[in-house]
Image: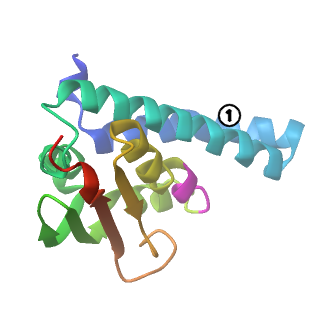
Amino acid sequence: MSATSVSLLEQRRIEAEIVKPLLTAFEAELGRKKTQEILARVIVQLARQSGRQLRQASADDRLQSFAAMLPLWQQDDALELEILESGDKVLRFNVTRCRYAEMYRDLGLDDLGCVLSCNRDAALIEGFSARIKFTRTQTLMEGAPYCDFLYNRQTSDLAT
């Protein structure tokens, strides 16, 4: 089976099912806090690497190129989005349903969903482009009614 035949949602589910027993074992040895710190660090490193790979596969590092990749995260109806603004300088949307969060809850990993999934978003865009800044103030995973995503591209370098 090729990597393209598995949706990102399914990939995250497979990863979570592997990670769950490992986390239990590491927590028994290292404690919960240390285990979560290590997990968070690894997830951020992987997300930055994914961002760099997305950048290499993209025509450029503009917001439109990044926005064109949103369907990848939406496969299998994984995310329901409300696009609020999409242009050269700003990409802003709300996630009103997140099956990633639902999946982590179903697997009994709701306390780690932010580390395993939400934590990736800022690091992913860092890997994609240092020119784009990411802001989010709330997530469905943490109990908010929606996730608010805001990407701003520095205006001083739009011509490049």
Q: Which residues are magenta?
A: 111-115
From the viewer's perspective, is residue 155 above or below residue 140? above
Mark 1: few/some/many CA within 10 Å (<14, 14-19, 20+)? few
The quadrant where residue 85 appears: bottom left
Q: Residue at x 40, y 56 (%)?
A: 103
Viewer-proximal residue, 35 or 159?
159
| Amino acid type, mark 1 | Leu
From the viewer's perspective, is residue 58 above or below residue 135? above
- Image location of residue 145, percent across then percent down: 37, 83
Q: Is residue 98 magenta?
A: no
**Residue bearing the label numbered 1:** 22
- Image location of residue 158, percent across then percent down: 18, 50
- Image location of residue 35, percent across then percent down: 76, 43
Total labels drawn: 1
Q: Residue at x 36, y 72 (%)?
A: 147
From the viewer's perspective, is residue 105 above or below residue 115? below
Viewer-proximal residue, 159 or 83?
159
The type of colouring in the image is: rainbow
- Image location of residue 123, percent across then percent down: 47, 45
